[in-house]
Amino acid sequence: MLFISELKKRLGADKVTQNETELYRHSKDESPHPPVEPDVVCFPENTKDVIAIVEIADQFGVNVTPYGAGSGLEGQAIPINKGISVDFERMNKVLDFSPEDLTVTVQPGITRMQLNELINKHGLQFPIDPGADASIGGMVATNASGTTAVKYGSMRDQLLNLEIVLANGKVIRTGTRAKKSSSGYNLTGLFTGSEGTLGIVTEITLRLHGIPEHIIAARCTFDDIDTCAAAATMILQSGIPVLRMELVDAESIATVNAYGDYDIPVAHSLFFEFAGTRGGTEEEAATAKELMRELGCNDWEAAGTSKERAQLWKARHEMSYAYSHAEGVVVAGGDVCVPISKLPEMVHLARELTDASGLKSGVFGHVGDGNFHTIIAFDPNNPDERARAEQANKALARRAIEVGGTCTGEHGVGLGKRQLQQAEHGEALEIMKQMKQMLDPKNLFNPGKIFP
């Protein structure tokens, strides 16, 4: 293929490969969507390399699909039209670190753990935690959030500036290093969550936050999932400033116990984390405990040391692996976000739908911001099981939209939620399509994602 020869000429042969192992690695992510191998994989090291890739793609009419850590859950990194897979693992540098300004500028391939390893030494943290050690670029692409979203919000709330390579090869910057601006349209917000369909991110300037003086983690259980969800709502309405709040149903606790040989109480559970000064944190945890007792909770357990906190949260972080570790099984995940007042109703519905599927399943999530997940394990070679899993998740997503929520709180649209975009956005979807057409008229960037 001529375009591959041109890529090797412009980038250098060491940045371009058709190795079968690499083609397969870049054919999939952690979603259950079928893999598609690209024609070639490129490993750019700087913005200049990305410009060259885009110019060659434009010249030969070849599709370009960005690839981060491969931890996505909706197929965004799958190159469904083959073409070029652009892996950012070599673009993993910190370009500027300004502790006094609480900002850092990085390349997209650095992962959140790599970043925190550097900045934690300075008493600072990047708090967005989607669970996986995702790349910062991938987290921008999906507007990731995670367990700390109740306090810090989503990825969009952490971004000050993006450097973007557009489909015509031009480079733009969407913001500044200032904490806020009233100048012009919010292009940073537009490209965040666009899943690589509008442009390719090559630099990211992030807000940073101080590491709290003291952290307390806690867990309590309830006899039924409705009360558990209502308790989460009560915590939020009481004004207690939690850092993390996770709901995990009894089925998921039992699954992770079997997976990790743990002895966590098998019941519908709420996990909390409180952070701040020692006195303030202890008072908040005590108030939460009293409130949960009034609602009939069982087994309140608190932990103060980092080792104890890690043990307490172990079940939540290993949830997906607990369901998917069995041979011949994959998982389909729902990812809705709803108004807080609708949380108990929606969690109850999620449990009904997953039970009705007849498949091994669980309900859990970052309920502090109304975002929760379903996880359903099925045999990918069994069309009936796949259909039942997809039906349950789509029914939940459609109901989430009906009650004023969204079909995805953090995983993104990708391939899995394209058919729900019209129901959620209505006429606004046409505006999105027009933006796509204006910025990428040849539809070269990550085609087939977001739009049905």
Image: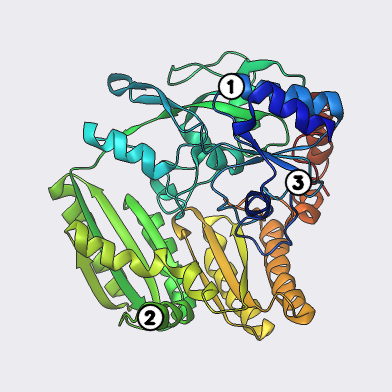
Left or right of 358: which side holds 244? left
* Secondary structure beneath label 3: loop
Pointer 2 local density, CA inside 10 Å: few below 14, some 14–19, many at least 20 = some
User: Vertical placement of 131 versus 178: above or below?
Assistant: below
Report the residue marked by disc 1: 47
- Ranked by sequence position, the earlier of labels 3 and 2 is 2
Question: Are the residues tagged 1 and 2 within 8 Å (C-beta)?
Answer: no
Left or right of 150: which side holds 391? right
Residue 40 quadrant: top right
Residue at x-position 31% and y-position 53%:
240
Q: Nearer the viewer, residue 228 or 14?
A: 14
Q: Nearer the viewer, residue 389 or 421?
A: 389
Q: Nearer the viewer, residue 357 or 277?
A: 357
What is the residue that sits farthest to the top in this orientation?
183
**CA distance separating discs 3 and 2:** 36 Å
Q: Amino acid at mark 1?
A: Thr
Report the residue marked by disc 2: 257
Residue at x-position 84% and y-position 31%:
2
Pointer 3 local density, CA inside 10 Å: few below 14, some 14–19, many at least 20 = many
Pointer 1 local density, CA inside 10 Å: few below 14, some 14–19, many at least 20 = some
Residue at x-position 72% and y-position 70%:
390
Q: Amino acid at mark 2?
A: Asn
Residue 254 quadrant: bottom left
